[in-house]
Amino acid sequence: MLREYDCAFLDDVIVDGRVAHAESVREQYATDESPHEGRIPDAVVWPATTEEVAAVLEGANGRGIPVTPRSGGSGLEGNAIPTAGGIVLSTADIGHVDVSPADLQATVGAGVVYDDLNERLAAKGLRFAPGISSGDVATIGGMVATNASGFNAVRYGETRDHVRRLEVVTADGRIVDCGRNVVKTSAGYSLKDIFVGSEGTLGVVTEVTLGLVGIPEYRRAALVTFPSRVDASRAVADAIGSALVPGAIEFIDATAMKMINAYHDDVSFEERPTLLIELHANNSGIEEDLAFAKAICEDHGMRSWEAAAEENVDDVWQARRDKYHATNAYRGDWEVALVGDVVVPISRYPEIVEEVSQASDDLDLLTSCVGHAGDGNLHFTPLVDPDDEAMVERAHELNERVVRKAIALGGSATGEHGVGIGKRKFMCEEHGPAVDLMRSVKETLDPNGILNPDKVLPDG
Amino acid sequence: MLREYDCAFLDDVIVDGRVAHAESVREQYATDESPHEGRIPDAVVWPATTEEVAAVLEGANGRGIPVTPRSGGSGLEGNAIPTAGGIVLSTADIGHVDVSPADLQATVGAGVVYDDLNERLAAKGLRFAPGISSGDVATIGGMVATNASGFNAVRYGETRDHVRRLEVVTADGRIVDCGRNVVKTSAGYSLKDIFVGSEGTLGVVTEVTLGLVGIPEYRRAALVTFPSRVDASRAVADAIGSALVPGAIEFIDATAMKMINAYHDDVSFEERPTLLIELHANNSGIEEDLAFAKAICEDHGMRSWEAAAEENVDDVWQARRDKYHATNAYRGDWEVALVGDVVVPISRYPEIVEEVSQASDDLDLLTSCVGHAGDGNLHFTPLVDPDDEAMVERAHELNERVVRKAIALGGSATGEHGVGIGKRKFMCEEHGPAVDLMRSVKETLDPNGILNPDKVLPDG
């Protein structure tokens, strides 16, 4: 019998219409995009202001009620599943945006959706740059929580690199400003960095001041195919090791290309290991960089080089962005078992790509791979018959094997999706004694353990 | 009567020759480069390995003996002054360097000197990029401790942005690895970021894995003069706000130029408000960027534009680097009272530059300014007669006034020198309730308060 929490106090601190006790609403907040088991929370609340967030947390903390923060709900590791019940606190309605173009900076509410923000910024020639796949759903608050990144991190960095200041509400309801609206500072402990990537286990982010970049004047993209995965991944390692700084360098294996082609009526890419290379610049020197990139690809036996016309670049990226849906749609009732997400030092990228391939063969799984290769980040998605329990089990075995290999190569269990529920078991292997320090930080900032229980840290 | 600590245990944990109890040695470790009052420590120790650092800390922690970490001793805010006595722990002898060019990465001991590291890296076409003035003395450990940066941070970021992994020894002597050798990760709390910039108050950094950048193939530099400080600083704000990403953009006021000219027999720069602009690129598009930079300077009434020949660029930078010595040498027995270091949002840069000028006039002080202007970072150095107590007092009043103005403009009390002793009193004004969280972190990681007492956090 799961414990139920009395959340009646919410009606005293949040205006009517911003609290849901009805099961029909609550059940929509039981899961996220991950395959992890859901749980229906006891209440859902949508504060409109930081003060309301503080009131919810103060009340919950005093009563020992678990609070799971959430906004877009697009997490892939169970990051926003209310496993302990209690309250789901959605920051989706905190949606203000204040842009300061002269400072290349925007201050935004946690609930602002990534693509919406970038649409507003584009009118001013600016961009928040990590370049995530799920930008139509994911919010800035969620991106801060998981330290999200994606296609363009190879040039511009992960979310952490753009966060200048956070407004955070602590477990006991204090409102705290962390960081300043400057590009650098040496003034004390960088608290913002402890909240970035903490997945709502240390505090609830309500507002973020982000650094922005200018939209590049010149963009060139090319689809490059290779005889083998290893050739493609070696070309990536060589390009990055040669200090080329692409706008994006995406790896797409032959299986993934096949799925993308099958999903879209209007595309037919070559079904070979492929790199989608995009370069950014503000001057015509970009042509020299493009020639340099091409020469590196030639060194690694490239089969074809197709420059994408400027007007087609976004279409190619959209096809890549739809890859998750394409995979799910590929084979009747089969579905994606999980979305793997590992990162390794760039020189080891060919090895991790091979490991996925070898493990999939060993385990008799149909696995496709894409990855923000320039960062050493690889995603792999085993497609399974959900009714075949043994096959589902083998998909999780694949994940474990690849994660362990990534850690052994000096890499990390997650490049951008976060730990959530799914990656907790690897934390000791990856971090060793540092996990004890992480626990101390958690106990200090959330002594009652109300914030997003069962996430990030392994059981003690 | 200052308390003395019995440090005899050091002889049991550190080999002979790596411990000093003699006053003639100890007194050399009483101060750093700052004007703050020194104190002779009770012992100085130079561990050669991480295990020795752990043994020192474990022993000191059990005995309640203060430990002040130190390496280069080039701090400007009293960061390494052993104000409470006890042990000075120098990491200067931890000097290993292991470069992995394919991963654009180097793993180095805390005692490695910045310029020495870059000399070794240059042979491989690589660079650790923050670009600090005191690179001939400052060590990597010290740079991590203060989150140091300098000339090139505007393009490449501060030290924090390059730290992939830290090996840290905690107050109680545990050896902990924080972070992984990857360019991005979402695997748990970013402990490394809480140690970066903590000035040895939370742990002792023994080893650092740094991300590197390629040395740019093309470099262009120009010295540009303006009719007024305001014109020069507006040109900087305009360039950055236009998303130009220079390799460096340094502000040097007319007084500073006069001092630089007086110090060097072989230079005679124009004594007007000046920007030293440097651009970096790997292709010939750099000429377009240079033309763009020049057009912005023209918009702000530039008086002269002198392109520096490639072979002279380093000489010009050396003149700028010597500015501190030039200031001290400028007027007989007068000396630099303090080196101011504030940072503001770039759009407010003209205001902070004016504030220094106005405050110097009001307080009848001879103050010169330089600054890594592209970051909104400004240094100001009042020159005083050290025997004139009232004048010295006015210099500190100037500092207070400018720091308070920087904070009021949304900026920070220190851009790169750290808090040390000198900036503690501004922490509550800058951070508000976040200071309480910082205190909690300190109490968690150093419960006995042995690590670098009296630094960073204000008295509670």
Image (cartoon, coloured by chain):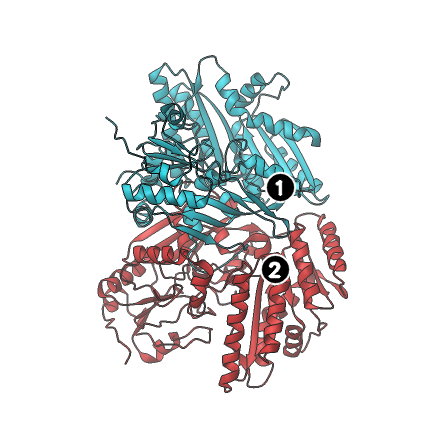
Chain colours: A red, B cyan
Query: In the picture provided, is A285 more to the left or to the right than A55?
Result: right
Query: In the picture provided, is B130 more to the left or to the right than A295?
Result: left
Image coordinates of residue B62 in percent, x first then y, are 29, 44
- Is A23 or B127 nearer to us in this picture? B127
Q: Which residue is mark 1?
A: B121
Pinpoint the chain carrying mark 2: A
- Is A247 or A295 nearer to us in this picture? A295
Residue A127 occupies quadrant: bottom right
Image coordinates of residue A125 in percent, x first then y, are 58, 52
Q: Is residue A441 above or below residue B115?
A: below
- The reply to whether residue A386 is visible in this rendering is no
The residue at the point 43 percent across, 70 percent down is A78
The residue at the point 56 percent across, 22 percent down is B257
Counting the numbered discs, the total is: 2
The residue at the point 70 percent across, 32 percent down is B310
Question: How busy is the neighbourhood of tag 1: few (under 14 within 10 Å), some, or many (20 plus)?
Answer: many
- Is B353 or A280 nearer to us in this picture? A280
Image coordinates of residue B386 in percent, x first then y, are 39, 16
Residue A348, numbered label: 2
Name the residue type under label 1.
Leu
Q: Callout 1: helix, strand or loop?
A: helix
Query: In the picture provided, is A413 more to the left or to the right than B390?
Result: right
Name the residue type under label 2.
Arg
Spot the residue most to the top: B332
- The reply to whether residue A187 is visible in this rendering is yes
Image coordinates of residue B154 in percent, x first then y, are 55, 41
